[in-house]
Amino acid sequence: MPALRRAAVVLQQISDSGRPMSLAELTQRTGLPKSSVMGICHALADENLLARGVDGTYALGSRLFELASAARAHGLPIGDIGFSYPVAESFFVAEIDALRAEADRLGARLHVHAAKEDRRTQSRQIVEFVSAGVDLILVEPVATDGLEDACAQARAARIPVVAIGSAVSGADAVVATDNTKAGFLAGSALVARLGGRGRVAVVGGIPITANSDRIAGFLAAIAPHQRIEVVATSYGELDAKSGRRAAAEILAANPAVDGFFAANDQIAIGISRVLRGRKLSVPIVGVDGARNAVEEIRAGGPIVATATQDPAALVRAAMDIGIALHGGAHVARPSRYLAPKLIDAHNAADYQPWG
Amino acid sequence: MGIADSRTPAVHRGARILDAVSSGAATTPSGLIALLELPKSSIADLLGTLEDVGFLTRRVDGALHPGSRLSDLADPESVVQNLFRACATPDLEGHTISLVRLFGNQIVFVDVHLGRLPLPLTPRPGQRAEATECAGATAILSALPADDAAAAVSAAARHLGLTDDDVRRCLDLRHRRRRKVYESQSAQMGRQLACPVPGTPYALTLHVPRGWPEPAVAKAARALHAAAQDY
């Protein structure tokens, strides 16, 4: 057996005993030749991995604690990551792709589950992640509220929960786009497009803070323009189909809408299909920076602007915080908001959309 | 005794590798060859053994890191990480927290979570200090029945060459009535608050910065107690 392997055996014996041990005792416990144990103990004591007492016994040395601390500082390896997301829509698929890259980088296993836009399903998935003993839970929420009990279970098990995209009651941290700013950028673009006057419709999204923030930002952008009037408000979900439904309802009640704000680009795509079907030239602004929305902007509309999100950057920031929390660090900024950028006809050609 | 006249040069070389990797001075085989000026085959053999025994791990990107076995040796109860995680609360933000265990009439700093606030003496992992200067010793001894406390101090008495008086003085630190938080103040170690960690031989210690306002100290003490209880 190589000397280093024997040294590990000696250190383990002393660690297990929890008290200083003599050479004779170490020889008996390890079954190694006494001369070998003596040589190893001398070398380990020289290196301060063992401390030799006045009675000739050996205890763990200061350098072992230093190395152990360094091992912890390098972080407990993250072996398993759980991710619960609403549906297999392109934005979340882009997040999953980024997460796979992060998991590969760490050598971790990624467990991905779609909550199908149901908060009870998402709550159950978080609890299942806790039961499975994952090291980190990431949640792209289907709702801001309703996950508190599941998050509390994760907290009790010392498993960090990081919300991506929108805040979650009970999560340890959140990484999201600055959605208020995103709504403001989109609203400013619509105001400019309409020349400061017109009747607009607002189509919100699922009940998460990200969507209420976007609407608040949009309303803040149009507030100084008294000739801009919100004539209809409706809600979509995460897909184009819900945008089509919302647009049809709004146009049935208000045929003379001059512009649309959509809480996400897939809703905007659905609205666009309705408008094109009716040959209506009405501008739409959205949030996401999705590929199909940017292609419409490049083609001249009806979508004229979108405020970007960066799913890969959101995931990387969430992983940074999650790794820090997993390692026992206090995270000074548990809420991190990434700045969006407005994409319109002027810069759409240079923008590389995700998805 | 150096490597040249050692009967077990591999132990010394292994220690140098662990130092280089843990400090970040070299985290790849080629970096270690350049830094330690050892033959490639020798480094390969040593790394193979260090990885086998869990003293080193190799990440997916090929970088070497100190292995979890080192942490397990210093903390067989595997509670350090959870305790420091439990201390990650706003009331303990910025503070230096240490986990200590008793060793004769001394305490050993098992690990230290360094804060940002200056202290009279900043503890380091593996460092020892006189039990009489550390609230952690009082916390550990007071949490034990009298016989167990005596056994805990005596376990390292001969190793340290303690007299009966030394042992007695250390045991005098034990409070008969248990408290949630124990306090010490010394010129060298400064002010400390400590809580025993139930079911373990440890105490969690808060190193209080000089002049820290009392309401903040009281809040931190409550947070420390909560962390020691629920980690």
Image: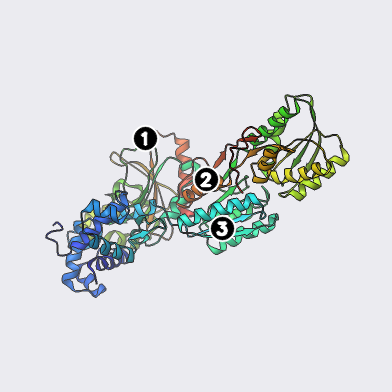
Describe residue A11's horizontal placement relative to residue A310 as left or right.
left
Circle 2 residue: A317
Residue kind at label 1, given as amino acid type = Arg
Q: Is residue B49 above or below residue A186?
A: below
Q: Is residue A245 above or below residue B102?
A: above
Depth order, front residue of B79/A337: A337
Depth order, front residue of B10/A262: A262
Gap in angstroms between the C-alphas marked 3 and 2: 16 Å
Residue kind at label 2, given as amino acid type = Ala
**Measured from the top left, where is residue A115 in percent x and y?**
67, 57
Q: Are marks 2 and 1 in contact (CB under 8 Å)?
A: no
Query: In which quarter of the view is residue B164 placed?
Result: bottom left
Q: Is residue B43 above or below residue A271?
A: below
* Residue sitting at x 43%, y 54%: B81
Circle 3 residue: A82
Circle 1 residue: B210
Describe residue A15's horizontal placement relative to residue B94 as left or right.
left
Gap in angstroms between the C-alphas marked 2 and 1: 36 Å
* Residue sitting at x 30%, y 45%: B133
Gap in angstroms between the C-alphas marked 3 and 1: 43 Å
Please tell me whether mark 1 sits on a helix, a strand or a loop: loop
**Measured from the top left, where is residue B193 in percent x and y?**
39, 45
